[in-house]
Image: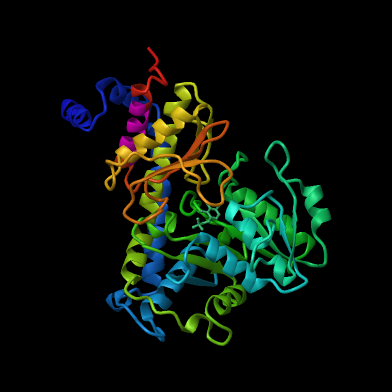
């Protein structure tokens, strides 16, 4: 088998010594992979339980069109999400265009003029800056008279409880807590940490709405923030919970009243959750949610494998090779533009789609430097599929995530290393 595998890797462009180096690293990860398998097993059962408890039937997989009144599949899927995430209610819709849209709907549905929004975990994800109006933008919450306040994490990545207490005012209506670090270098928050923070906030003011941006966090642990006190939890279906099959969509789960507030903003006052045709996506939403626990596990194994490979080669990695994981993102600081480009070309060359194109850095809108992106995905822009991107600026880090199967994630990472070796930018340890 070993020779057969080695020959196949060679056929795909991975030289023997690269594969063997990978196998050596992999040999040290058995215990961690076993734990990831257990989490996936638990979450798989959690999802199946939610589907059974809500009597998912063949009729749920059918399409609706037009207004989409009485779409059994849509309404049942929302119950499945609510049950699986321990929430009262859910909004899971193809009309939610992306994660930013889901967050914008949850925020604008639950905030009113004169209210204040607080982020106690530092600056939110880039695209949220324009939603909130941190950067002036047409249609921002700021334009509707919602103010914003932020408390940064302390230098060691922990919560600044004293400053948070001072920042809560009678106008504070909603607190937004981003679980994943996104493109920052702060640590990702664990579900336990988020639970503690929510507990602290509720002690100050029980009526504050605590919302968690759960992007990239779903199914990484056995519990979600909605099971630890979050009133609202929001995410994208082209990340973890779509399982790679959802072609579009986002979700908002939480307390019934707050989900309803979001629903009337997404559709219209008076209509709320009653309208919104599903046009045939129900099956992929269900099947993707069913696969999501094991797909997330594959992505996590890839992230840990990469962390250990690149750490061993001397590059700074966040999280490091041994750290507990709370999302699927891996950052590797490669230190030069050439290395970032080679890494991304490796990920691209390992893709099932568009493997023959070589990604180039370009001036993407919304970024202050050129950015290179690698993605050979079945769903455009899907980042639960193996993907990588890196801004071409110091410290020349790449952020990568995803992998629908562990085998593909492994191949992609080995290919990134092969490209770095080919370019003479790294040498294997003797
Ligand atoms: C991806 C992401 C978003 C935004 O989602 P899009 O689908 O890109 O709009 C928001 N917050 C976090 C933490 C994310 O990772």
Image quarter of residue 359: top left
Question: As drawn, which residue projects farthest toward the front?
Answer: 363
Instruction: Specify whether 190 is left or right of 58.
Output: right
Q: In what quadrant of the picture does the N terminus appear?
A: top left
Q: Residue at x 31, y 26 (%)?
A: 23
- Most common SS among magenta residues: helix
Residue 380 location in percent, x, y?
37, 56
Classify residue 389 as left or right of residue 268: left
Residue 68 rendering spot, x and y as whole percentages = 40, 83
Q: In percent of the image, x 39 and y 53: which residue is there? A: 293
Left or right: 220 with respect to 207?
Answer: left
Q: Decide if residue 228 is in sight here.
A: no
Q: In x, y percent, where is residue 340?
A: 45, 32
Direction top: furthest residue = 430
Residue at x 61% of width, y 53% of height? 178
Above-or-below relation of 281 to 121: below
Quadrant of res 248 = bottom left
- Residue 102 is covered by the magenta coloring: no
Foreground: 223 or 96? 96
Residue 51 in view (yes/no): yes
Viewer-closest of 89 and 288: 288
Check the image and report above or below for 216 versus 281. above
Which region is colored magenta? 409-419
Locate the C terminus and report the quarter of the image it occupies: top left
Whether residue 414 is in magenta: the answer is yes
**Who's the residue at 74% across and 66% down the image?**
206
């Amino acid at each position: 088998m070993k020779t057969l595998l080695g020959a196949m890797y060679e056929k795909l462009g991975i030289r023997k010594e690269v594969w063997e180096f990978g196998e050596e690293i992999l040999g040290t990860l058995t215990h961690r992979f076993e734990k990831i398998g257990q989490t996936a097993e638990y979450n798989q059962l959690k999802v199946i339980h939610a589907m059974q408890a809500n009597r998912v039937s063949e009729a749920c997989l059918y399409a609706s069109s037009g207004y989409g009144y009485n779409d059994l599949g849509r309404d049942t899927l929302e119950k499945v999400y609510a049950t699986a995430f321990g929430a009262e209610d859910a909004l899971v819709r193809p009309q939610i265009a992306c994660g930013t849209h889901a967050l914008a709907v949850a925020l604008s549905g639950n905030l009113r003029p004169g209210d204040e929004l607080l982020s106690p975990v530092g600056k939110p994800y880039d695209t949220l800056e324009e939603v909130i109006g941190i950067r002036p933008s047409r249609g921002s919450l700021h334009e509707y008279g919602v103010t914003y306040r932020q408390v940064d994490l302390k230098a060691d990545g922990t919560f600044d409880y004293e400053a948070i207490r001072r920042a809560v005012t009678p106008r504070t209506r909603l607190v937004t807590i981003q679980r994943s670090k996104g493109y920052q270098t702060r640590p990702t928050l664990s579900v336990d940490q988020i639970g503690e923070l929510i507990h602290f906030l509720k002690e100050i003011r029980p009526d504050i709405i605590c919302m968690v941006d759960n992007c990239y966090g779903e199914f990484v642990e056995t519990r979600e923030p909605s099971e630890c006190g979050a009133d609202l939890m929001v995410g994208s279906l082209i990340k973890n919970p779509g399982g790679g099959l959802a072609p579009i969509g986002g979700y908002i789960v939480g307390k019934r009243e707050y989900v309803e507030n979001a629903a009337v903003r997404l559709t219209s006052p008076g209509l709320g959750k009653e309208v919104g045709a599903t046009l045939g996506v129900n099956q992929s939403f269900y099947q993707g949610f069913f696969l999501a626990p094991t797909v997330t596990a594959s992505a996590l194994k890839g992230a840990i494998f990469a962390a250990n490979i690149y750490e061993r080669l001397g590059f700074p990695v966040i999280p490091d090779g041994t750290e507990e994981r709370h999302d699927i993102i891996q950052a590797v600081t490669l230190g030069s533009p050439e290395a970032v480009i080679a890494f991304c070309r490796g990920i691209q060359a390992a893709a099932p789609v568009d493997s023959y194109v070589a990604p180039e850095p370009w001036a993407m809108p919304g970024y202050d430097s050129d950015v290179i992106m690698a993605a050979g995905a079945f769903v455009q822009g899907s980042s639960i599929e193996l993907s990588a991107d890196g801004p071409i600026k110091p410290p020349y880090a790449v952020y990568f995530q995803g992998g629908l199967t562990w085998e593909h994630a492994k191949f992609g990472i080995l290919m990134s290393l092969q490209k770095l070796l080919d370019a003479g930018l790294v040498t294997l340890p003797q």
